[in-house]
Amino acid sequence: MSSPETKKLEDLENRIATVRGKHAPIPAKQEHHTMANMAWRMVIELVAGIAIGFGVGYGLDWLFGTLPIFLILFIGVGLAAGIRTMMRTAEEVQKMHMAQASEEEES
């Protein structure tokens, strides 16, 4: 190719890049939705722990005929397991935020 043709192609590429930049969609921030998803995840983890504890406790009480003992015990165990799982999720969120903050500082 000769020099004038190369110059024309470069000018055309620059104009195309400029037009694409003006009409490019603006990426939406997903942080709000991500945080809402994490909050729901934590609530579900807590409720699931309590529900599983209730089910196991009620089943054992029905099996042995001692209605309130195992029910109360396993609801407490389910609550503790749900809280522990929620704390693990909170640590995960904290690590994610710290990684994002360090990436922003490096930029």
Image (tube, helix red, strand yellow):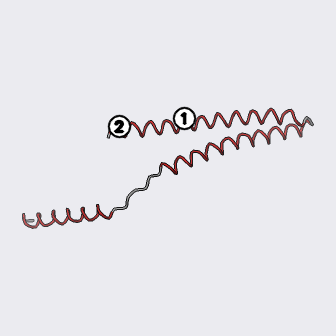
| Residue at the extreme right | 65
Question: Which residue bears the numbered disc 1?
Answer: 91
Q: Position of residue 18 (x, y in %)?
A: 24, 62
Q: Residue at x 43, y 37 (%)?
A: 99
| Separation of marks 2 and 1 at Cα, in angstroms | 21 Å
Task: Determine which quarter of the picture holds residue 45.
Answer: top right
Q: Position of residue 35 (x, y in %)?
A: 53, 46
In the image, is residue 26 above or below residue 37? below
In the image, is residue 40 above or below residue 105? below
The type of residue carrying mark 2 is Glu
Left or right placement of residue 61 versus residue 98 in this view: right
Q: Where is residue 46 in the image (x, y as percent from the top left)?
A: 68, 41
10 Å neighbourhood of mark 1: few (<14), some, or many (≥20)? Answer: few
Q: Which residue is drawn at 56% across and 49% down?
A: 36
10 Å neighbourhood of mark 2: few (<14), some, or many (≥20)? Answer: few
Question: Which residue bears the numbered disc 2?
Answer: 105
The type of residue carrying mark 1 is Glu
Task: Determine which quarter of the picture holds residue 81.
Answer: top right
Nearer to me, 35 or 17: 35
Q: Which residue is drawn at 84% across and 41% down?
A: 59
Q: Which mark is residue 64?
A: none
The answer to the question of whether label 2 and label 1 lie on touching residues, with beta carbons closer than 8 A, is no
In what element is the residue under mark 2?
helix
